[in-house]
């Protein structure tokens, strides 16, 4: 599938992400308007602005493909089931972005009949472009990436994020307490998309989250899979774009984590 200007899909998506990323970079140091979507769930004027920009740029190059974005669900057709669909998060880690903490990214994924076929996750402050196409491997700035080769949780750096939901957050901390001190360390990342990309690139060894949305995980699922890792839902079942929890690691650590978390509230759907 080629864009209107004759480029491949991935090439176009990377250009759109670079363009949107430069807006995030510029706006990061300026004042932002913050609105509450929930008790802990926020959105800034920049999320809305950048999502609009991404949407318009993708529409120009691929007018026939539908669009689902974190900030415009409900306003658009959200039937993911048939055909091609863009799945976009203009800022993953909005809380970090709004607070001035330099760790956030943007996500553009493409699904076909609910299967992820390509995605990018771009960290504009570090100029790190994680990109992936089904069957073609996972890359960071054009260099192939792989999950870590660590053999056990005891050797692992574990990434997590807290759910907005009070119980979801407790259920995420519970496995950390159970594993401690038999892990190297744990990090609360602040961006699930980057948390998953860091597993794909072997920087961390395990990432799990209680409750994600399709746009948070669309890039991470394919990146970790194509980087040779295993991704499942919290029960250990095959992950789907809509699964609301995730566990990602290399095969060995993934299995060890499923065993250690068995029976905990973290695994209850
Ligand atoms: P966001 O920044 O796009 O809102 C840390 O909070 C990470 O987990 C972020 O990637 C955040 O996405 C995501 N997250 C936290 N709670 C969530 C929830 N209940 N549903 C979806 N995503 C959530
Ligand atoms: Ca998000």
Image (cartoon, rainbow, N blue to C red):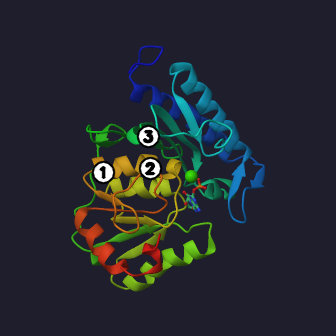
Residue that label 2 marks: 241
Q: CA distance from mark 1 to mark 2?
A: 13 Å
Q: CA distance from mark 2 to mark 3?
A: 15 Å
Q: Determine which of the numbered discs, if any, sits on residue 120 in the image.
A: 3
Q: Nearer the viewer, residue 158 or 64?
A: 64
- Work out whether mark 2 precedes mark 3 in sequence or the reverse, and give the earlier one: 3
| Element carrying mark 3 | strand
- Work out whether mark 1 precedes mark 2 in sequence or the reverse, and give the earlier one: 1
| Element carrying mark 1 | helix
Q: Residues within 10 Å of mark 1 (few under 14, many from 20)?
A: many
Side of 144 relative to 41 (left or right): left
Q: CA distance from mark 1 to mark 3?
A: 14 Å
| Element carrying mark 2 | loop
Q: Residues within 10 Å of mark 2 (few under 14, many from 20)?
A: many
Q: Is residue 158 above or below residue 35?
A: below
Q: Is residue 254 above or below residue 154?
A: above
Foreground label between 1 and 2: 2
Q: Nearer the viewer, residue 204 or 126?
A: 204
Q: Is residue 227 above or below residue 78?
A: below
Say whether marks 2 and 3 touch (CB < 8 Å). no
- Image quadrant in which the N terminus is located: top left
| Image x and y of residue 171, in percent | 51, 77
Side of 94 relative to 230 (left or right): right
Residue that label 1 marks: 225
- Work out whether mark 1 precedes mark 3 in sequence or the reverse, and give the earlier one: 3
Determine the residue positioned at 57% across, 20% down.
60
């Amino acid at each position: 599938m080629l864009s209107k200007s004759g480029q491949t899909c991935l090439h176009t998506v990377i250009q759109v992400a670079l363009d949107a990323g430069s807006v995030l970079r510029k706006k990061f140091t300026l004042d932002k308007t913050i609105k509450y979507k929930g008790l802990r769930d926020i959105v800034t004027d920049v999320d809305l602005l950048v999502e609009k920009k991404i949407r318009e740029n993708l529409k120009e190059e691929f007018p026939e493909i539908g669009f689902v974005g974190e900030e415009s669900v409900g306003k658009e057709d959200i039937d993911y089931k048939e055909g091609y669909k863009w799945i976009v998060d203009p800022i993953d880690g909005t809380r970090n972005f709004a607070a001035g903490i330099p760790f956030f990214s943007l996500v553009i994924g493409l699904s076909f009949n609910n299967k992820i076929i390509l995605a990018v996750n771009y960290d504009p402050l570090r100029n790190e472009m994680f990109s992936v196409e089904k069957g073609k491997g996972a890359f960071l700035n054009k260099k192939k990436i792989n999950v870590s080769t660590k053999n056990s949780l005891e050797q692992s750096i574990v990434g997590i994020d807290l759910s907005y939901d009070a119980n979801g957050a407790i259920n995420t901390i519970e496995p950390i307490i159970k594993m401690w001190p038999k892990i190297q360390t744990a990090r609360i990342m602040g961006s699930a998309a980057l948390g998953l990309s860091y597993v794909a690139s072997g920087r961390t060894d395990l990432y799990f989250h209680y409750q994600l949305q399709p746009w948070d995980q669309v890039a991470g699922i394919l990146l970790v899979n194509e980087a040779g890792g295993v991704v499942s839902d919290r029960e250990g079942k095959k992950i789907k774009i809509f699964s609301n929890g995730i566990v990602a690691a290399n095969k060995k650590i993934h299995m060890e984590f499923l065993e250690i978390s068995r029976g905990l509230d973290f695994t209850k759907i």
